Amino acid sequence: MKHIVVLTGAGMSAESGIKTFRDADGLWEGHDVMAVATPEGFQRNPELVLNFYNERRKQLKEVQPNQAHKDLALLEINYKVSIITQNVDDLHERAGSSNVIHLHGELRKIRSTKNENDIKVWTEDIHLGDNCESGYQLRPHIVWFGEAVPMIDKAVEICQQADILVIIGTSMQVYPAAGLLDFAPVETPIYYIDPKPAMDKNGKIHVIAKSATEGVKTLLQILD
C-alpha cells in the first residue's frame, strides 16, 4: 500500500470559514499576531491571549470540515495516509482522517506553563487562575512564534517515507515546516494545491492551481 503524506496549511481550512492572519496584513481576527501568538505577548497580557484563543475555540465549534478534508479521509481506503498540518483546528480528525500530526499545536488542548509535556484535552474557555495540578497557569497548547516545534522530528521521519507528497493551502515559506519538502525521497512525486501557488511546476512538482476543495477533487482523479 503506497504511503501518501499530506502537508496542509491555512488554505485547507479557509473554505470552512477559518481565517488566517496571512490574509489580513499581519492581523489575525483583528489582532496583531505578535500580541496573541508569542510568549512575550502572553507575558504582557495573558488575559488578552487567553480570551483570543477562547474565541477561536468557540469558532471551531461553529465550523465543519469541508469537502477537501472529507476527500483526504477517503484516501485511506486505498492508501496509507499521514497528514502533517500547520493548522490548529481539528477538522482533519472530524472528517475522518486517522493519522494527523499538528506541527503548531491544537486549539482543543491545553498545557501547563511550567511543563510543556503536561497536556490535556480542553474544549471550554481558559481563565486566569485556571491552574495545572502543580499550581501553574494553564495556557493554550499552541506553538507560538519563537517556540520550538516539538513534532518536527516526527514530521521529518514521516516525509522520508512518502511515496507521494501532497501540499495543500500553504506557501511553504514558514520554517521549520517549509523544510519538510526537502526530506521526501528524490523519486517521490509532489502535488501542490493552491489557488495562488508559490512554487513553479517542474519535473517533480505538479502544480494544481485550485482551491483546496477543487484541487483535492482533481488529485483524486489523477490518483484513480
Image (cartoon, rainbow, N blue to C red):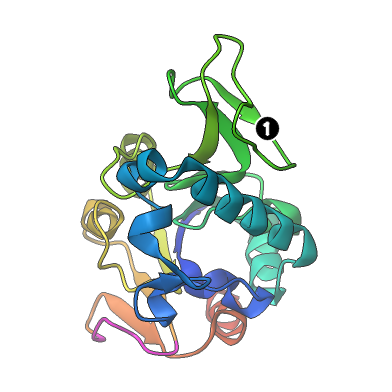
Residue at 60% across / 50% down in the picture? 51
Look at mark 1 in the image and give the residue it sits on.
121
**Numbered range of the magenta stretch:** 195-201
Residue at 38% across / 56% down in the picture? 35
Q: Which residue occupies the foreground of this view, 160 or 67?
A: 67
Task: Give the vertical position of 37 relative to 157 (above or below).
Answer: below
Q: Going by the image, does 210 lie left or right of 17?
A: left
Residue at 60% across / 21% down in the picture? 131
User: Which of the 4 image quadrants contains residue 134?
Assistant: top right
Q: Amino acid at mark 1?
A: Val
Q: Which residue occupies the foreground of this view, 188 or 146?
A: 146
Residue 74 location (% of width, % of height)? 70, 63
Q: Which residue occupies the foreground of this view, 39 or 211?
A: 39
Q: Going by the image, does 155 lie left or right of 8?
A: left
Residue 62 location (% of width, % of height)? 78, 65
Residue at 54% across / 71% down in the picture? 12
